[in-house]
Image (tube, grey):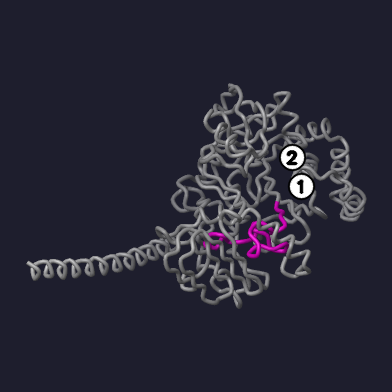
Amino acid sequence: MFSQILEVVQRSSSEIAELRQECVDLRHANATLERQVKEGLQQNGYNNSSRVGTGFSTPVPGSPQLRAKTSFLAPSTIPSLAVPSTGYVPSPLGDNYLGGYPFQTRDIPGFYVVIPAGGAGTRLWPLSREGHPKFLLDLTLKGRSLIQATWDRLLPLSSPTRTTVVAGPTHIQSIREQLPDLLLHNLFCEPGPKESMAAIGLAAAILAKRDPDAVIGSFAADHMISGDDAFLSAVAEAVDVAKKDYLVTIGIAPSHPSTGFGYVQLGDKLKISEAPNARVVSSFKEKPDARTAASYIATGKYRWNAGMFVSKATFLLELLKEYKPELHDGLQHIASCWDDEGLRQTALNDVWFNLEKIAIDNAVAEPAALSGRVAVIPATFGWDDVGDWSSLADLIPAELNRPRILGDHNLVLTEQVAGGIVVPGSGRLIACLGVDDLVIVDMPDTLLVTTRARSQEVKRLVKKTKDAGWKQLL
């Protein structure tokens, strides 16, 4: 009896070993196949400047691969993070170039894109810094920074002639390097951070002067979006509604009762034939507690407020004049001098730093909603503002019960470790044993260790770092 049992155990062990080897072989075969597919796509013309098989020869402007320009992202110090892949690799969260539709048909005449690009680099510190915030980073290691993915995603609607960026002086050079197709006169430099209303209002005032009929859409440079068709369709509906004198926002279908986002309450349908999904905004809600957020979702009448706004430039300025007249007058004065570089600088020096620091939601969207002048397009695309290390971890693929790794997997060894995210940015080996849901960011000059649950508090640690005199690490 014993010998029979032993024989069965030995045979089972042998079969298990064979299965393990088959799994290893399958992984290698899949990796080889994936590489061959990517190489085949590039060789077949998807990496060229024009679309293949669409019947159009108009070149599609592209953006270069992300090139590190700071010491902590330099190839010499962090090859695993900074070295881009060869050839064009589309963003996995904004896969335009391999989409099934011809870009040229999506152009919306008279529609201008505004991309506010700012940030202090505190949420994803120490990977992001003041001089190199998250919108300049390639957080998916696919050769595309967040602002490049935003540019690619919106380009079908507006073309480079009607795509603008608003940024601070610290980031102007990096943006120009990452977006070489961005026209110089469409890059608006704000002297200092003044929240979203001043940035978007400045763009609106300049564009209204260039084109009184301009419809503008503001989309942050550092958000991740999946489902380009659904995104572009929502924007197209928003433009049609905006033409009827509405300030239009795009509401994201909530996937969970988040306490980190504001909410938009859906009102009655607008019954606009060109925009069948459009509704009036009943109200905006600030970031709720968990119980309130759950109650919002249970009703089915709330959407996340992603901070995307579409409006006629002149209508937005009218709302601003009504609710924030001093801010309106200051921005109009700057815009009136914008084309004269000398007068522009004088106006910026005299006016900009005295402008009110306020978000567009608080300045015009919330009060205008009370009078029924704000609409919402309920959208179905995936969205995330990558607000902390925990949310970034959710966007990075990983094997079951393994941490996410942003960088070279060969530099991370784990044993009985689940969840969490590891950034091997210094080039040295990181070994983890029996720890779950940790955030480990290892840079050449700084090491951050926290938990996913506390990752939203990293900015408090950044403040302590500054107070302790480590300003060179910010």
Q: Earlier in the sequence, mark 1 or mark 2?
A: 1
- In this rendering, the answer to whether 87 lies above or below 453 is below
Q: How many marks?
A: 2
Query: Mark 1 = which residue?
Result: 195
Q: Residue at x 74, y 45 (%)?
A: 196
Label 2, residues with CA under 10 Å away: few <14, some 14-19, many ≥20: some
Where is residue 182 drawn, in percent x and y?
A: 68, 55
Indicate the amino acid at tag 2: Ile
Q: Nearer the viewer, residue 469 or 236?
A: 469
Highlighted range, magenta: 117-144
Magenta stretch, main secondary structure class: loop
Query: Marks 1 and 2: CB-CB under 8 Å?
Result: yes
Which label number is shown at residue 360? 2
Looking at the rendered structure, the secondary structure element under dot 1 is helix
Q: Which one is in front, 429 or 149?
A: 429
Q: For marks 1 and 2, give the CA distance.
A: 8 Å
Which label number is shown at residue 77?
A: none
**In front: 409, or 183?**
409
Residue 257: x percent and y percent?
Answer: 55, 39
Q: Quadrant of the N terminus?
A: bottom left
